Image (cartoon, rainbow, N blue to C red):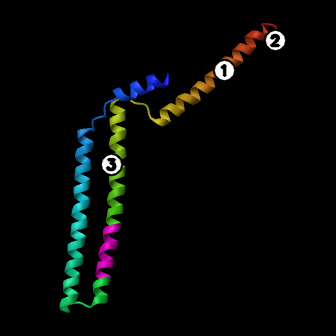
Amino acid sequence: MSEVEVQVVEENVEPKERNPFIESTRKVLLAGVGVVALAQDEAEEFVNRLVERGEIAEKDGRKLVKDMMERRREKRSKVRDEMEGELDRRIEEILHRMNVPTKSDIDALSRKITTLTKKVDALKKAQDAGPDA
């Protein structure tokens, strides 16, 4: 393709619309991130007020905030792992329903093709050698 043809093709490409499901999921996840950030800010403010009022020591307040953040980090990691697993499972399910081969399916077919190619080559050599061989 010439440079002019490439430019014409690029200009005619319209922006791809986003999948409504993916867009909705993205919005829900962003809202969740916002809620978590807000909750963390509120918890830190609450602990700071307790420290200011003298109801807990500053050292204990810092430890409490640190513990909350660590628990949140662990929970976030666990939830992320669960979500990734669920997403992988659903994608595999969708691909299966659409009859899309997996990488392992393609690898198995490649191995079979290689085996068949070797057998065909061996048969050709035997045939070329003639019936005397």
Q: On the image, which quarter does residue 48 sit in?
A: bottom left
Question: In screen coordinates, is 51 left or right of 94?
Answer: left
Q: Specify whether 24 is left or right of 74.
A: left
**Type of amino acid at the residue the image marks with label 3:** Glu
Q: Residue at x 44, y 26 (%)?
A: 6
The tag earlier along the polypeptide, 3 or 2, is 3
Instruction: Assign the C terminus to one quadrant of the image.
Output: top right
Residue 20 percent across, percent down from the top left: 23, 39
Q: Amino acid at mark 2?
A: Ala
Q: Nearer the viewer, mark 3 or mark 2?
A: 3
Q: Would you say the residues marked 1 and 2 are in contact, meaning their CB atoms lie under 8 Å apart? A: no
Residue 61: horizontal and vertical position, in percent?
Answer: 27, 85
Q: Earlier in the sequence, mark 1 or mark 2?
A: 1
In this rendering, position of residue 30 left or right of residue 87: left
The answer to whether the residue labelled 1 contacts the one labelled 3, judged by CB atoms less than 8 Å apart, is: no
Residue annotated with mark 3:
86
Would you say the magenta stretch is mainly helix, strand or loop?
A: helix
The residue nearer to you, when weighing 57 against 100, is: 57
Disc number for residue 133: 2
The magenta-colored residue range is: 63-73
Of the residues tagged 1 and 2, which is closer to the observer? 1
- Is 130 placed above or below 32 here? above
Q: Amino acid at mark 1?
A: Lys
